[in-house]
Every structure is written in structure tokens, then in C-alpha cells.
Amino acid sequence: MPGLVHVILERGGILGSRPSKELVVCTKNPEEAMFEHVEMFREHCYGPLEDDSGAWGLRTGDGDEPLIVVDAGMNLGLFCIYLQRHLCNSAQSRPVICLAFEPAPESYEIAVRNLRDAGVRTVDHGARMPETGQAIGNLAPGSLEVHVFQMALSADAGAAESFLFFPESSANSALARHRPDVKWPAGAVPRSVEVQVPCCRLSDALASILGGGEEVTSVAGCSWPLFLKVDVEGAEVEVLRGLTSEDWRRVEGLAVEIQGEEHLDAVRGLCASAGFGTEGGASGGLRVALQPHAFAGPEAPELWMLYGRR
């Protein structure tokens, strides 16, 4: 692919108490890759984050019960690699099955390459969901299996949508109706390409993976907990509306980047309806933080991070 470069994000060494391999990814924008790496690997923007009331976001833990993780907004695949290095990092760690979604064809191709280069077990479903339940592979403690979809998550299934893709700023790409171009001042908007992308509901994708095989008989009957990481540049409400009430009950935690107060109020409402309670709970509830803004466009929305836990 023209314009791709390799970026070293981590040198080999010791991660925690064990040797760690060098982390190299392919990208068209080295600064963006380094920014995402700092956010996830050093600042732990999706968790675990600690405050006086405990841990928020993604939480590590040992045990035999698998954790289902949703990566909505895969981009370069770094969050899945974060799971590999920080969650599935010992023989005692709980096994993780991740469903990762990236609608932009070019970003999807790069992400799959980065995951496989990092040694992540990757099942490539492309732009289609399996028609029947996909048998799950190795569920040994410490294992990670990532199912990748070249699709956008939506409240409605089936229809294709226009997607505005920025080749040199892929993390800011989004469904065209969310107008991602308004983040930049006039005259500073990077080159973009509008493409049609397929859409699916999150619960349909969960059913396609967890609905078959000997381990799980049905999604509704599955007790495995869910963690949601959502960073989709304005489509966060639609992603969450694609969950059935049965699947909402299995969500034990979430970390959602939210664009604009209107979307923040809507996500708060969805979480409250799903039983997450209010902000500031000692044992559960929601935590909201205003994020620093990297854009200077006159219509750029405010950015928030919302964390939820049971």
C-alpha cells in the first residue's frame, strides 16, 4: 500500500515481570500512531483508571470465565494489541474474545496486518457476518482471539452508509452524516475520500460469533460479561442502540468517547436504562470527564469520556 511506513512504538524489554517484544505498526501517519499509543498504553484512556472509588474502564483480572470485549472504532488495531500486552499477559489471565469493527477498507487492511504482525490470533470476517454461530477457538487462560469486521456499527442493520475517510488522519474518519470535517478550520481540512460501508447491529454481530459451537448455546443464555470500548467519532449513540436489552444486562463495563453534550445526555440515558445508575457511585455507576481538544474548527464538538461499571 503506497505511503505506509513502519513506526516503532515500544522497544523490546520487560513489561511488568515478563519479557516484551518490540512493538512496530504500519501507518500513514506516524504522529497519529504515537498519539494513540500514548493514550492507550501510558494514559490508559480506556482503563484501567483509578480514583478514590476504585477502578474504571477495562479492568484486568484472573479466572477461567471469558471476557467479551467490543472494539468499536479499531483504526490501526492498537487497542487489540493493548489487550494482548496488558490484559492477556499471563497464564492466569482470563481468556478474552474481542469483536473489532473498522468500516474504512484501507484502515481495516492496515489493522489486520498490524494484529497479525503482533502475533494476535485474528479471524477476518471482512464485510459480512457469519450466517450461523462461529465456533470459538482456544479459550485457555491468557488467550486472546480477535474477530474483525469491515463494518460500521449502527442501530439498524443491513443498509450501507456514506463514510468520510481521511487517509492521512484515519482516526478522525466517520460516517459522513456526522460531519467529521467540521473539526478543522476552513482551509485546513485534510484530504478525504467518501466511500460506502456496510452496517450491522452490535447484538447481531455478537450472535454471529457467540451463537454457535459447543461452548455457547445462545447469546441470551450466555453469562460471559461484556466490556465496550467505543470511539466512533459521533456515532456512539447508534452503536449502543444496537444492543438488545439482554446483551445490555451482560455489560459489566464500558469506556465511550462522546462528541457533544447532546450525545453525552443520550449515552447517559441509555446507560441509566441499562442499570448503570448515576455518576459518583462508590461501587458502580458512571464517571464522566471532559477531554482536551486537539481541533480548532468553529463547529468542533466538545469531547467527553464516559466510563460505566456495574
Image: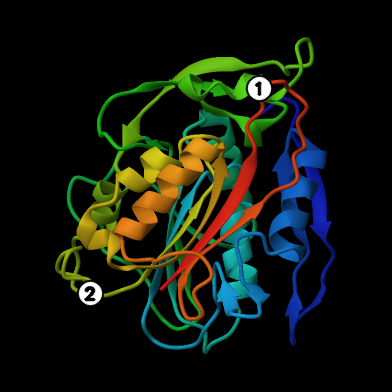
Along the line of sight, the residue nearer the viewer: 147 or 302:
302
Q: Is residue 148 visible?
A: no
On the image, the x and y values in percent for residue 199 come to: 34, 32
Along the line of sight, the residue nearer the viewer: 177 or 145:
177
On the image, the x and y values in percent for residue 248 come to: 29, 60
> In the figure, residue 190 lies in which quadrant?
top right
Q: Is residue 232 left or right of residue 220?
A: right
Task: Please state the total of marks drawn on the protein image.
Answer: 2
The residue drawn where x is 82% and y is 40% is 31
On the image, the x and y values in percent for residue 20 come to: 75, 74
Q: Is residue 82 visible?
A: yes
Q: Indicate which label's residue lies in the foreground, 1 or 2.
A: 1
Q: CA distance from mark 1 to mark 2?
A: 48 Å
> In the figure, residue 222 lies in which quadrant?
bottom left
Of the 4 image quadrants, the one containing the C terminus is bottom left
List the residue tagged with mark 2: 215
The amino acid at mark 1 is Glu
Of the 4 image quadrants, the one containing the N terminus is top right
Along the line of sight, the residue nearer the viewer: 2 or 247:
247
Q: Is residue 134 left or right of residue 174?
A: left
Q: Is residue 307 left or right of residue 23?
A: left
Mark 2: secondary structure: loop
List the residue tagged with mark 1: 299
The residue drawn where x is 39% and y is 66% is 277
